[in-house]
Image (tube, rainbow, N blue to C red):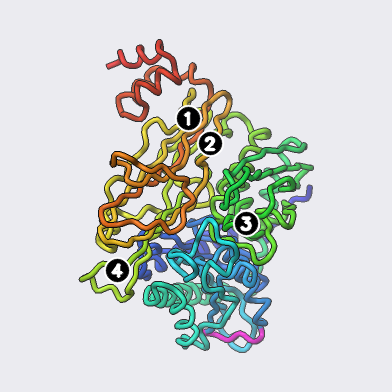
Amino acid sequence: MTNTKLADPIHLEVFSNRIVGIIEEMGARLVRAAFSANIKERRDCSVALFDAKARLVAQGSHIPMHLGSLLGGVEATIAAHPLEEMLPGDAFVCNDAYLAGGTHLPDISVITPIFAQGEDNHNPSFFAANLGHHADVGGAVPGSISPDAASIFEEGIRIPPTKLVRSGVVDEGVLGLIAHNTREPQSRILDIKGQIATNNVGVAQIRELIGRMGAAEVDQAVADLLAYTAQRLRNKIAALPDGVYSFTNHMDNDGVGGDKVAICATITVVSDKATFDFTGTGPQSRGGFNVMPSGVMATVAYAIKTLLDPDLPPNSGLFDAIELVVPEGTILNPHYPAAVGARTTTCQKLAGAIFGAFSEILPDDKIMASSHDVLAAMTLSGPSKPGKGQSDSAYVYLETIGGGNGARALADGMDGAHAHITNSLNMPIEAVENEYPLLVEEYALINDSGGAGQFRGGMGIARSIRAIEPGTTFSARADSFITAAAGASGGAEGSHCQVVRNEKSNAPDILDPKQRLLVLETGETIRMETPGGGGFGSPQDRDVDDLARDLADGRVSETAARRDYGAKMTDAALARD
């Protein structure tokens, strides 16, 4: 193992923090400039900086999954548009999974070359890049994602790397072509223009930094930063015991039905190198749950950073110490033109499998039970709310809902939170009811949803929506209607995911969370219930005071407590003040 010698470690730390500061400011500008609620309120967006070799220099602390689309988009843009043909003021747009390295079509990337001061006639030095998840990009269903989509052609407009801005002038024809292939054209136009403006902020600040430091010094700092990250990760891997470690997670099905789909992760550690082999994973989905290799890469990067070194700088250096084996024709590397819209839940299951494999390696205090490991997403659509001045005739409301995270060796799991590669906010109830003809009837934690254990799994979330206009459509994509978050060290599994139509009626309809275009009439409700996390340790070892608190707070019912913890412990807990 060779240690990397840095040119100036102190200067490197200052440079790294300056770059992160620029990226975080870009992220804040992107949110403030957004028109659509999905970016403005839910912050389903990310920003990053790349060098001219398409190497990631820094990524904002937003959505880990977005690294796949951003990195793939920059690589594809450079391949399609030679550096020597780019000009200051240009910007490119892309989203396609097969043509632009993306992960699914709603994630539209805007990529802007950065030319150093005095280098207007030379190649760009860096690229500012950002991504917004647009609530609709056309296709067969509102929201552009269907669990049973047969191919990517059902999922919306496909954008290869395309020049959108030429020397500072937006090509309104290209922008209009993109926007008018969606259900909310005005929202798409305004959000994409906000993305263009966000990159311009990054361009100006990086140019100023290069002007102050000098191009050669900046290049050296970037090289040092990537080398430092690679060496730091190698050191972490070298501290692990050599060996082969495996875990298999499961999805209920491939989005169309049938048998469970295995998600297999095998990690081989040899000295300071780690190989992530996903051989044994099930065949590609007949529906929309396929993942492109760029999404697999982003998921592995997240898992490594989370489990081995949370403070590791997020850049391309972390890929130098790892190798990926992703067999073709599987749900993690499908053949064209497989649909990919619902890829996030598959990546959540993949992250769970990687965490499971690492549980054989890491010390007990680093191990946790399985989290909900899905992205429970719901989309409602219909005519826009009258009298609110919306410029689009239709609305598309997208919500992704957190769930229960796995319990750890020393603490209960986190309640009602996103897990793994997603990190968006919920849409505030006030924003939903102001923007759309919908009424939020419930947004609450689900009692008895966390797996029992010495430490309880986190609780899932219920969100119930009432349609107040006829003809409202509802679609959903998730998993774990059949499977559940596994417990660890004797802990119980968490609850399941489900959709309930008209839950307060005399005949509520309990549905699989994979739904396409249910039509709700005025007054009907739809309730999404997300899974709870697995418990850690034997329920018999739970502290009575902790159980008493759960009972008093309504997190655990008396019936469930007697079932999972026994009558004696439950009676003792109920007797506490």
Marks 2, 4: nearer the viewer: 4
Asked whether the beta carbons under mark 2 and mark 4 sit within 8 Å of each other, the answer is no
Nearest to the observer: residue 113 or residue 558: 558
Residue 275 percent across, percent down from the top left: 74, 48
Q: Which residues are magenta?
A: 84-89
Residue 295 falls inside the magenta stretch: no
Distance of mark 4 from mark 1, alpha carbons? 41 Å
Q: Which residue is mark 2?
A: 485
Residue 453 percent across, percent down from the top left: 49, 24
Which kind of residue does numbered mark 3 sit on?
Arg
- Helix, strand or loop at label 3? It is loop
Q: Which residue is mark 4?
A: 384
Residue 473 percent across, percent down from the top left: 37, 60
Mark 2 Cα-neighbour bin, 10 Å: few <14, some 14–19, many ≥20: many
Marks 3, 4: nearer the viewer: 3
Q: Is residue 144 left or right of residue 394?
A: right
Marks 4, 1: nearer the viewer: 4
Q: Which residue is mark 3?
A: 286
Distance of mark 2 from mark 4, alpha carbons? 38 Å
| x 65%, y 53%: residue | 331
Distance of mark 2 from mark 3, alpha carbons? 24 Å
Q: Is residue 273 left or right of residue 461?
A: right
Q: Which residue is mark 1?
A: 451
Asked whether the beta carbons under mark 2 and mark 1 sit within 8 Å of each other, the answer is yes
Distance of mark 3 from mark 1, alpha carbons? 32 Å
407 over 236 or under it: above or below:
above
| x 61%, y 67%: residue | 97
Specify which label sits upstream in the sequence, 3 or 4: 3
Mark 3 Cα-neighbour bin, 10 Å: few <14, some 14–19, many ≥20: many
Specify which label sits upstream in the sequence, 2 or 4: 4
